[in-house]
Image (cartoon, helix red, strand yellow):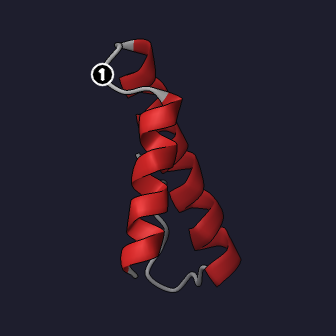
Amino acid sequence: MAEKIEENETVTLEGLAISNSFEITAMFNILERKGLITRNELEEELSRLRTEH
């Protein structure tokens, strides 16, 4: 889970992007280990989303 910060601390956009990337990668890795998704399925879905948007 994301690390909590103090109210007066600021987070950079880069920091948010890196944190988000780690969290998504962790979720994918868990789903892949459990046999619920394959890397190919992920790549196909990413391609589909990019085409739509």
25 up-or-down from 35: above or below? below
The percent position of residue 26, horizontal first and vertical second, equals 50, 36
Q: Please, what secondary structure does the residue beneath circle 1 have?
A: loop
7 up-or-down from 45: above or below? below
Look at 36% across and 26% down and name the residue there. Answer: 31
Quadrant of the image occupied by residue 10: bottom right
Q: Residue furthest left?
A: 36
> Which residue, given by chain and number where applicable, does mark 1 sit on?
36
The percent position of residue 25, horizontal first and vertical second, equals 54, 41
Look at 44% across and 14% down and name the residue there. Answer: 33
Regarding residue 27, the answer to whether it shows in the image is yes
Look at 57% across and 55% down and name the residue there. Answer: 21
Look at 50% across and 34% down and name the residue there. Answer: 40
Q: Viewer-proximal residue, 16 or 43? A: 43
Give the number of callouts: 1
| Quadrant location, the N terminus | top left
Q: Viewer-proximal residue, 4 or 43? A: 43
Q: Viewer-proximal residue, 28 or 53? A: 53
Regarding residue 12, the answer to whether it shows in the image is no
Q: Residue furthest top?
A: 34
The percent position of residue 5, horizontal first and vertical second, equals 49, 67
Horizontally, is 15 left or right of 51 in the view?
right
Q: Amino acid at mark 1?
A: Leu
| Quadrant location, the C terminus | bottom left
Q: Viewer-proximal residue, 3 or 25? A: 25
10 up-or-down from 25: above or below? below
Local packing at callout 1 (Cα closer than 10 Å; few below 14, some 14-19, many 20+) is few
Horizontally, is 6 left or right of 17 in the view?
left
